[in-house]
Every structure is written in C-alpha cells, then in structure tokens.
Image (cartoon, rainbow, N blue to C red):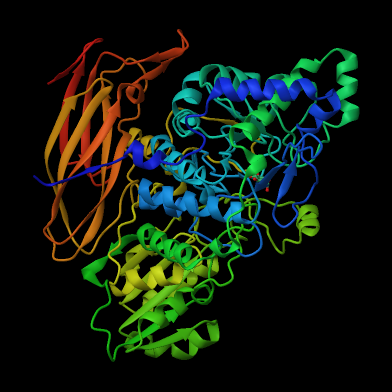
Amino acid sequence: MTREILAFDHDLIHAGNKGLGIDHDNVTEQVDALLEQMTLAQQLNEVRGLQAHAIDGLYFAGGDADLAIPPFKMVDGPRGARTGHATAFPVAMARGASFDVYLERRVGLAIGLEVAARGGNVLLAPTINLLRHPGWGRAQETYSEDSFHIGAMGSAFISGAQNHVLASPKHFAVNNVENTRFEMTSDVSPRVLHEVYLPHFKRCVVEAGAASIMSAYNKLNGTYCGEHTELLTAILRDDWGFKGFVESDWFLGTRSTSDALNAGLDIEMPVGFRFSDENIYAAIEAGSLNEATIRQAAGRCLYAKVAWDLLHQVTPDPSVVESAEHLSLAREVAEKSIVLLKNQQQILPLSDVAGKRYAVVGDMADIANLGDRGSSFVTPTHGVSPLEGIRHLVQTAEVTYLNSAADLASLTDSLADFDAVIVVAGLNFVDEGEFIPTEQQEAGGVDLARGGDRELLTLPAIQQALIERVSALSKQTIVILQGGSAIEMRAWVDQVQGLLMAWYPGCEGGHGIAGVLFGTVNPSGRLPVSIPREIDQHVPWDITSLQVPHGYLQGYAYMQANQSEPEYPFGFGLSYTAFALEGLIVQTTDTGLRVSVDVTNTGAMAGATVVQLYVSCRGSKVLRAPRALKGFGRVELAASEQATLVLLVDDESLAFYHEQIADWQLEACQYDLLVGFSSVDLPLCSSWLFDGQDWQPM
Ligand code: BGC
C-alpha cells in the first residue's frame, strides 16, 4: 500500500485552536455577571478603540482596570506582526501559490506567536477577500481568485494563529477595489454573494472559529458594510452562529452611530468618533438606539475576553520574534511559493556552475522587495535580496551585478557572453498596495507609500524595457518577476527563456529565489491567479468606478466560460521533475464524496506537485462555473515515489444558493469530478449522478 495523504486533515489543521470548543453557556454566564456590574458608561468603553495611531504597533480597544477587564490589543497583519522588527513572511498571495494548508497553518502559528510576544492579543488577519480582479491594489494580501482555495488557506492560517491570539479575518465583505474603497458599492445578487464572496468567510467562522471579524470600508448593495444588518447580523450571527465581535475597519469604517450598532458592529476602530459618548447618548435620547444594544455589543467583546481568558494571557518570550525557526519557515514558504512559469530547453536549474559567469540585472535585484507599505507592511531586521541570495549560494561562479542603465550600456555587447542573464523585475509598493492618504502617511510616518489599484496589468515601462533589452542581447535570459498578483507579459514572454514568479517573497526571499534558480530547491508553486494575455480576459475593471457590479464568474471561471485562453492558467506551475496521476477512485461518504488518486514522481529528482480537483455540474438549471475548484493537495515525493492523495468533498460545497427559497440546494444533475495539475490540465474524470437523494456512479 502506498502512503496516504489527507489533503486537509481537520484534526491536524485545527489542533490547538482556542477559538474552537468554547464552553458557550459557561462563558455567557460569566459575561452576564460582568455586565450586571457595569454601568452604561463602562459598557460603552468596551465598544471603541482608544487612540488613533498604534503604540508600538498595538491598537488598544476597551478594557477597564477597575473591573479587571483587559483591553484588546490589535496588531496587523497578513504577512507578519506589524510591530517593530518582525519576521516578514511572503505575502498571502505567495503563500496561496504554495497550495499548502499545513504550511499556512505554521505561518499562522508563527505570526500569532510573534504578535503575542509583542503584547498583542488580536491579529488583524488574514485578509480573505476574493480577488475579483488582479489589479486590486491589495491583491497581495489575500490568497487567490478562488473561494474554495481562500477558505482552505484562511482557515488553516486562523487555526494556527488562534493557538496564540484571536484572529480577525477581514474585510467583511466583498472588498476588492482599493482607490474608491471608502465610497464604492459592490453590487451582488444574493446568489453571487453567498456562493462566490462569502463561503470562505463562512468557513473561517464556522470551521476555524474565528474570534473576530473586521468589517469592510466599502458598501455592499448600497449600504456601508459597517452598518449592514444582513451581513453583520442575519448572515454572520443568525445563519453562521458567529459568537465573536465585529470591529470596524479603521478611519471611515464606521459611518454612523445607531445604524452601525443596530446592524451589529461592536467596536469602532481606531477611536470612538461615531461611538463617542456624545453621539451615543444623543442617539439613546433620540430613541434610535437602545441601551440594550450597547450592552449586547459590549457583551460580545467581553465574550471573547472571557472565553480566551485574556486577563491571564501569558506573553511569550520576545526571543520568538525573528527566531531562527521563524526565519527558516519564511524561507521554506518562499521556496514553496515560487512558481516556475517557463523553462525553455530546460535552461533551469542552472547547473555545473563552477567557473561559469552569470549576470544579475536590474535595480530590484539588490532589494528585498517585501511588498506594499500599507497596514500589512512588516519590517524585518534584514531582508535577503535576490542578489544576496544568489551570491550566498553560488560561490564557485562569477556573479556580475549590473544595476544601472549605464552599467548595462557598457556591457551591451558582452551580455551574450554570460552563461545566463538573470533579470529581476516587477512591481513594488509604489505600483500597488493599500492606498494610504497623504495625511495618514505623514501622521504615521510612512514614507512614499502610494500603492493603490493597478489600472493596467503590464509592467512599468522601465521594467518592461529592461527585460526587452536584455532578452534581445542574450538568449539565456531568465526573468524573476515580483509582484502581488497577475502581471501581463505578452509583449516579452516569448523572448525570454526562463521565468519565475516570485511574488513578494518575504525577508528570506532571496535565498528562495537562488535555490530555485540553481536547483537546490525544486519549484512547486502553482498560480493562485490567472495570468491573462491581456487585461480584458478578466472581468471589466475600472478603478474609478463607485458602483461595481459583481457577476457570478471571475478569474479562471470567467475565462473558461468565455473560452478565452490565459497566458498561464490558474493552478499552473512547472517542476524540475515530472508527475503522473492514475487510479482515480470516488466513493460516497455520509457527507459527500471521497476522492483518492495515486500520484507518482516519474522523474529523477525529489519534488512536489499540487493535485487539483475541479467539479463541473452538467445540465444545471443555473449558471455554473465550467469548472470549480473543490479540493487540492500538495504532495511531496522522492524520485519514483508514489503516494495516494485523499480529498473529501462535502455535499454542501457542491450545492448552489437557491434565491427563491433563500437556501442551499444540491441540485439533481451530473457532476464530473476532474483531477489534474491545473485548471486546464485535468486528465482524470469520474462522473457521478445525484438524483436528489443519492449519489450514483455513471
Ligand atoms: C486596513 C485594515 C487594517 C487597518 C489597521 C485599515 O486601513 O484596511 O486592513 O487592519 O487599517 O491598520
């Protein structure tokens, strides 16, 4: 029998998560007793942040020393603890490319531990907004363009983090445009909302027991998310059973007093402006707000404090921050997230390097490019640049760095003499990221952080010119791209011989890049976003729009429905070895289907692949994605080794949201289970019929 690998082992992933298994009745009793002792003024104190700007990265909210109630101490964010120096992990989009839930759990554990060591008790992460369009400025903060994928990665992260601190997935909900985020409305039908934009939130709440949720700045169907009763109460609490607290997104995240509190927003961050004494008492006086609502919001905050015993939280030793273990994890993640997109004539890995001559080109080669400088910015003590990583690894070859146009001009003729020319190009925090208004930059001391959405997906002209110039001179050109999501490359990709997508690879990224280039690491990342040939292959994108209709299809589903072939499809990535799939077996279980498949490394080098399961619903009476991801698993195999991957598909995940009955329904029709290596490479298929009651193989 071959080794069996469970794609998502719930026991393992959720181990130690303090948000699960809370004794609800007991905690509620304690909270009620506490509330009884509290005046309205004291309750009010629980529902707002205490200062506009973070103190050593900590945003305080609530807390009362006399009543022995601890404050929340909230810390950003999705790629590491934003306090002083901390381990800067590869951005979430990079981690999404690892398709490795077990690894993501470890990242959650590490970030949660660092936050706790810095005195924080709430981690403002993960960002789990679905990437509707790769031009979103904050694309790098989330995991992918696919809801199932985000749900799996996000819940793994939360379960890791919640071993140490409360996690607050954000931004609830349908937040996916940056420049107009304070005003725009995301317009969605109930079905699109429930099926496309919310399932990953639901999974993070229901399965991973997220202790908190951050609401979003934008409007949903015309109503600000921070005062959206359907979102914050009907869906989140009544339907999903969420017991935690909801804090607003920061400045401008709370737009009203009564409407926000009545809708279910519990804390205004970062300070009480709408939730000031003055506004709240006036609202009570005017009859638009009840004292009972304040008590309820305060009670939800207390619930988390009691359930997590925050009063007695032990602060881990600060030496865990940037520990050798965390740095090595950051490096492992970088290694596993880099995607090899092109490898013409096996130019990679660069081997037998002794005595060879390599040129490394581009300003970006000498910089540890960590991503945007908005709220997810993390400052490590040291960031390893690609050049540093290469020089560290390759000591028997000559590595020449050409950083400026002048350097390049002088070497133009001899560029072809190098054994390979490695161009590092891409985007940085000026090109994309959270958009930080100038006043906030000044107040918060953030330099030059422009960020925002990308109107186009092409590289900045200077970066593109560099690639074109080098590739015209050397037929051994390898491009290392950095960026937070898809980059259009039609203009130059045919001219280069090797291409790696390195994302923003974190503080150890340079080592990861060098490892993949020179073959000490076998690349295994897969694209979590479709790279289009041209931007129009993705859904319409207008970064100035204040009203954005969200259809049912986006990303790979949109392209497949339009029969539009991307440059590189969702789920794609090359390896230095080869894999084969066989023996697809599908069986019924009490809750759905169990899919198993044998994976073999048919090459001569150890490596990892990501097996993906997509489901096609044939003859459906509603619009469906031609194929929708419903399972994946990263499988590491020695040369010639075989293993069996097991994926569990719940009926629930195959159901569609029936708008007329406002509920989920598993439609009676044919379901094709397609298994393979990317959204377009699915060699195995098993067809099943659901007759309304039972599953039958076809
Ligand atoms: C961002 C949040 C972040 C918060 C605190 C907001 O502007 O949208 O993601 O957690 O700032 O820094």
Is any atom of residue 106 visible in this view? yes
Residue 61 occupies quadrant = top right
Q: In what quadrant of the picture does the C terminus appear? A: top left
Question: On screen, 516 above or below 241?
Answer: below
Q: Position of residue 340 (x, y in %)?
A: 32, 61
Is any atom of residue 264 visible in this view? no
Horizontal placement of 67 versus 236: left or right?
Answer: right
Residue 673 occupies quadrant = top left
Which of the pair 428/164 is nearer the observer?
Answer: 164
Q: Position of residue 638 (x, y in %)?
A: 17, 60
Residue 389 occupies quadrant = bottom left
Q: Position of residue 97 (x, y in %)?
A: 38, 52
Say which residue appears at 81% left-offset and 17% top-offset. Answer: 291
- Picture quadrant of ligand 1: top right
Which of the pair 506/542 is nearer the observer?
Answer: 506
Q: In what quadrant of the picture does the N terminus appear? A: top left
Q: Position of residue 315 (x, y in %)?
A: 62, 53
Horizontal placement of 323 versus 647: left or right?
Answer: right
Which of the pair 560/292 is nearer the observer?
Answer: 292
Question: On screen, 181 above or below 119?
Answer: above
Say which residue appears at 37% left-offset and 46% top-offset. Answer: 101
